[in-house]
Amino acid sequence: DTEVTQTPKHLVMGMTNKKSLKCEQHMGHRAMYWYKQKAKKPPELMFVYSYEKLSINESVPSRFSPECPNSSLLNLHLHALQPEDSALYLCASSLRQGQDIQYFGAGTRLSVL
Amino acid sequence: TQLLEQSPQFLSIQEGENLTVYCNSSSVFSSLQWYRQEPGEGPVLLVTVVTGGEVKKLKRLTFQFGDARKDSSLHITAAQPGDTGLYLCAGSGGKLTFGQGTILTVHP
């Protein structure tokens, strides 16, 4: 089983809303990642968690707030987003940070109005 | 900073044709992954190549890793409309370094 589950699949929010994206994996992976992807472009790394601790923040604006409650779950809290934040948000996991194979979820398609 | 140059960026072909996608870098990668992504979905891992000179086959897809582990290629034989999608190479060396992607369209 190499499944990474993301919810919701689609999300529409206003610029004053607060929402959260969720990601779950049960592969025993200890590294989890958030990526942002614009149409027809490669994913851009946002955050990396290793053993439930934030390891990398790629200078992401504070309106994006990640959280890793346990080794299987990863959240991305959203607040006061801008229309340019509309994108596909992907979660991925790997056995360890820096381990070769990252498995991706299906993503959350976010639209900010 | 490690960079992966992927080419071509766009490929539009007829069903039954062959094609090759290239990924090149001046950096050495410990391994390289190829992903395929359909619109609105996440990237799906196709293969990982680890050893310099390695060749892997997945049905009509053939993947090669360069001897120096700096470049890779994906060759598709007799492309089908179901092969349509965004193909991404990604090099591993701490973080995943993605190529710019190749948008493949196979027309029936």
Image: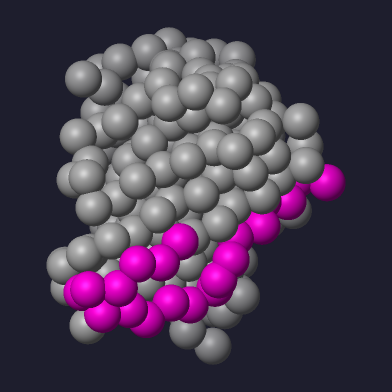
Picture coordinates of residue B80, whole percent (x, y):
60, 74
In the image, B11 versus A81, the foreground residue is: A81
Judge whether residue A8 is colored magenta: yes
Q: Quadrant of residue A55?
A: top left
Residue A6 visible (yes or no): yes
For the C terminus of chain A, the quadrant is bottom left
Left-right relation of B82 to A33: right
Judge whether residue B87 is colored magenta: no
Residue lying furthest right in this view?
A1
Q: Quadrant of residue A66?
A: top left
Left-right relation of A94 to A47: right
Numbered disc total: 0
A1 shown above or below A5: above
Picture coordinates of residue B20, whole percent (x, y):
44, 50
The region drawn magenta spans A1-20
| Residue plotted at (69% across, 39% down) | A72
Residue lying furthest bottom in this view?
B108
Picture coordinates of residue A91, whole percent (x, y):
51, 49
Picture coordinates of residue B89, whole percent (x, y):
44, 41
| Residue plotted at (38% across, 13% down) | B28
For the rendered model, the colour scheme is one colour
A55 shown above or below B75: above
| Residue plotted at (21% across, 20% down) | B1
Left-right relation of B42 to A112: right
B108 shown above or below B100: below
| Residue plotted at (30% across, 50% down) | A64
Residue B13 visible (yes or no): no
In the image, B79 versus A62, the foreground residue is: A62
